[in-house]
Image (spheres, rainbow, N blue to C red):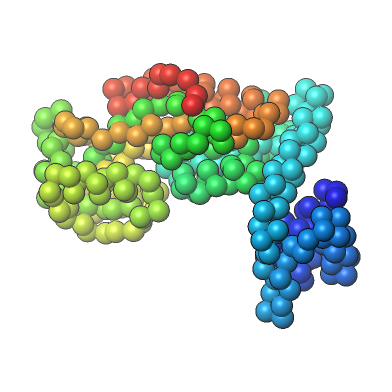
């Protein structure tokens, strides 16, 4: 059993098709088939049910798949660690982050990191927190910035809280303020025309739950938009939105007001696989994330603070 065989096995499992997997691996299909057959011979078990419509995993194949992914991830980690011993002159960091973080904190992180280490190859996955954790567990990412506490399996992830951030109500800076008070009540927000984010956003579930708990039905003007579009619509005066305080930084076209008690907030954490030693580049990326998060908290004032406690 070798890494080439495992990589071929993982790609066939991913596509459910030998032809597509061979194209992805730049192999001739007979070569790919021989690799899978040799792997099955070495293991003494068939890994795929082969049919004209495609190939599906057998019970043995389903058992092997997570192990194969982890072995490939470990091999890649070793390769990158050896490549980076020359002072971060080569290497790669695969970072995942939620959409709201990609338009705020991550832009600062990647800018600072690339300026210091221009030879390091950067890959970014923009997904919801649950999908990012799946990618992290599958060896597809080195680090993930998440905004949910779903990483409950301590043996799978090391999760370190970075920031605790309030959700605030934003409106157009060109329109009159929503209130003359320092805060606005959720009941008052419910009566305003709202730009509502797509259900794929973690914070959409948070705001929906808050309205339900208060027995309120918000006045929805536009629903299902992405964060950047929501902010632009608010800037144009179409309505208001409940968003993380972080996205307001460097957006003079928006005005914000804090919610009255009970406030809504979210914890931003950085997660990494618990059973994979980070490479030098990943360690430095982690340090860059922490420094950027601390700087963001200082700029945001009362709506954001550095989280206490360690990883879990």
Quarter of the image for residue 300 reads top left
Image location of residue 126, percent across then percent down: 52, 47
Identify which residue, 155 or 20, lies in the foreground. 155
Image location of residue 65, percent across then percent down: 68, 53
Residue drawn where x is 64% and y is 24% of the image: 284
Residue drawn where x is 72% and y is 49% of the image: 68
- Extreme residue in the front direction: 44
Count of labels shown? 0
Q: Is residue 210 visible to the viewer in this orientation of the structure? A: yes
Residue drawn where x is 67% and y is 53% of the image: 63
Image location of residue 253, percent across then percent down: 31, 40
Q: Is residue 83 above or below residue 125?
A: above
Image location of residue 32, percent across then percent down: 84, 64
Identify which residue, 118 or 39, lies in the foreground. 39
Identify which residue, 27 or 104, lies in the foreground. 27
Residue drawn where x is 59% and y is 43% of the image: 137
Going by the image, does 267 lie left or right of 97?
left
Going by the image, does 46 lie left or right of 295?
right
Q: Is residue 248 visible to the viewer in this orientation of the structure? A: no
- Extreme residue in the bottom direction: 52
């Amino acid at each position: 059993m070798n890494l080439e065989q495992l990589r071929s096995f993982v790609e066939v499992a991913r596509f459910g098709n030998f032809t597509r997997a061979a194209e992805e691996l730049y192999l001739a299909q007979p070569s790919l088939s021989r690799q899978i057959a040799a792997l099955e011979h070495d293991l003494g078990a068939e890994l795929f049910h082969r049919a004209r419509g495609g190939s599906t995993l057998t019970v043995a194949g389903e058992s092997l798949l997570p192990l194969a992914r982890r072995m490939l991830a470990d091999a890649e980690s070793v390769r990158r660690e050896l490549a980076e011993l020359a002072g971060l002159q080569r290497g790669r960091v695969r970072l995942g982050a939620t959409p709201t973080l990609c338009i705020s904190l991550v832009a600062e992180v990647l800018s600072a990191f690339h300026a210091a280490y221009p030879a390091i190859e950067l890959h970014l996955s923009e997904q919801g927190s649950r999908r990012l954790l799946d990618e992290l567990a599958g060896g597809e990412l080195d680090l993930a910035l998440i905004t949910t506490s779903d990483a409950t399996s301590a043996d799978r992830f090391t999760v370190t809280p970075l920031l605790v951030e309030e959700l605030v109500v934003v409106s157009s800076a060109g329109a009159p303020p929503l209130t003359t008070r320092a805060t606005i009540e959720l009941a008052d927000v419910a009566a305003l025309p709202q730009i509502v984010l797509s259900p794929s956003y973690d914070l959409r579930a948070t705001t929906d739950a808050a309205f339900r708990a208060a027995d309120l039905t918000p006045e929805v003007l536009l629903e299902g938009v992405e964060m950047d579009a929501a902010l632009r619509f608010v800037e144009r005066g179409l309505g208001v939105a409940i968003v993380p305080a972080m996205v307001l930084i460097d957006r003079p076209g928006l005005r914000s007001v804090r919610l009255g008690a009970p406030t809504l907030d979210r914890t931003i954490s950085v997660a990494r696989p618990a059973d994979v030693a980070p490479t030098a580049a990943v360690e430095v990326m982690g340090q860059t994330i922490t420094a950027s998060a601390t700087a963001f908290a200082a700029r945001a004032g009362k709506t954001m603070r550095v989280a206490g406690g360690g990883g879990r």
